[in-house]
Image (tube, rainbow, N blue to C red):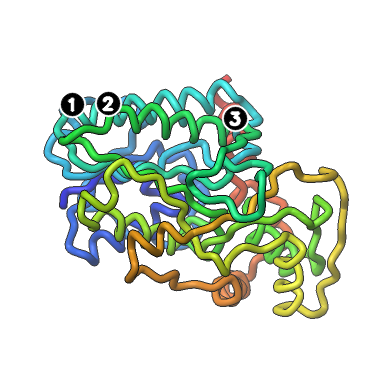
Amino acid sequence: MNVLVTGHKGYIGAHLVPLLIENGHTVTGCDINLYESTGWEETVAPQTEWIRDVRNLSVEDLRGHDAVMHLAALSNDPMGDVDAELTYQINLEGSVKLAEMAKEAGVSRFLFASSCSIYGKGAKLDMDESDPVNPLTAYAKSKIESEKRISALADDNFSPTFLRNATAYGHSPMLRIDLVVNNLLACAVSQGNIAIKSDGSPWRPLIHCKDIARAFVALGEASRDKVHNLIVNVGGNKENFQVKDVADEVQKLLPEAEIVYTGEVGEDPRNYKVNFDLLNFVLPDFQLEYTLQKGMQELHQKLTEHQFSEQDFAGDQFVRLRTLKKRLELIQ
């Protein structure tokens, strides 16, 4: 397949590009390169690379591609809180426009990176794709509205698939520490304590960033009838954890690190435990490569190798929100 990956220079895209190439696909990457200064390790380049805002692509740009794998977005709840309108412009209007152009260009498959965060404060602790959503943030609202509007474009020639990804973590050449697992582990490595800003009770489904990329490849290669206009939670049933459980796992790796509840954000209203049976049904041969323990061990090794410091933890390089704020200040 000829595949366009948007956001190919991001946290997940850095894994997705080499996986697609390894499987024999031809990859075009499109990325605004907002985080050009945040790279941690060398990344694999796609065969063709566009450093452009995905919102500026044209129908002609999209012609000749068999699939679009759309990762590009303002990437989490705190970033959405900085500028809700910008989040909707990029994550919602930009995504829908891209899907419309892909359809017009004759692209047959469109895989959209959605999020389990749309469940918000879950009505129960086993949320599946048929359950009502409760998005609490601009980021989550942009994702669910994108699902609705892109789904309406589906027909015999245009087949979207929506990946509601669990909360990502783990090593990537484009490291982030603004994710719960990575943050707690990086805090322990650099500061000697494990600082939890909530009460530690919220549930989160977790998935290694490389496993998200693997799911994109598997769903992109799956037969169309299995994934046409499908919404699917991406993660594993055994990989649901409370935040306090994650802290305990960090402490197993670093026994000298003390768990500290700072309480600065109070009770976190986002609390969702998610069911992933549908993914197992659609892709019976697909298995997660990482457990939380395996992924944390790998990331701990990488942080140690890179001599990750307190300065790294407090700096801008690995925190998307800080980088975004700095870039916005430069253009204002």
**What whole-number distance in Å separates the C-alpha atoms at marks 3 and 2?**
22 Å
What label sits on residue 74 in the rendered view?
none
**In the picture provided, is 155 more to the left or to the right than 271?**
left
Q: Indicate the quadrant where residue 323 lies.
A: top right
Q: Is residue 32 left or right of residue 170?
A: left
Q: Which residue is mark 1?
A: 104
* Contact, mark 2 vs mark 1 (Cβ under 8 Å): yes
Q: Give the quarter of the image for residue 50.
A: top left
Q: Is residue 115 visible?
A: yes
Residue 125, above or below 298: above
Q: Nearer the viewer, residue 98 or 311?
A: 98
Q: Is residue 59 above or below residue 305?
A: above
Label located before the other in sequence (1 or 3):
1
Q: Residue tagged by mark 2?
A: 100
| Residue 263, percent from left and from top | 87, 49
Q: Position of residue 3 (x, y in %)?
A: 22, 48
Q: Amino acid at mark 2?
A: Glu
Name the residue type under label 1: Glu
Q: Position of residue 77 (x, y in %)?
A: 62, 39
The amino acid type, in three-letter code, at marker 3 is Ala
- The relative height of residue 121 versus residue 327 in the rendered view (above or below) is below
**Secondary structure type for disc 1:** helix
Q: Give yes or no for contact between labels 3 and 2 (Cβ–Cβ under 8 Å).
A: no
Q: Earlier in the sequence, mark 3 or mark 2?
A: 2
Find the distance from the CA under tag 1 to the CA under tag 3: 28 Å
Disc assigned to residue 138: 3
Instruction: Determine the image quadrant of residue 320.
Output: top right
Rounded to the nearest whole Å, what is the CA distance between mark 2 and mark 1?
A: 6 Å
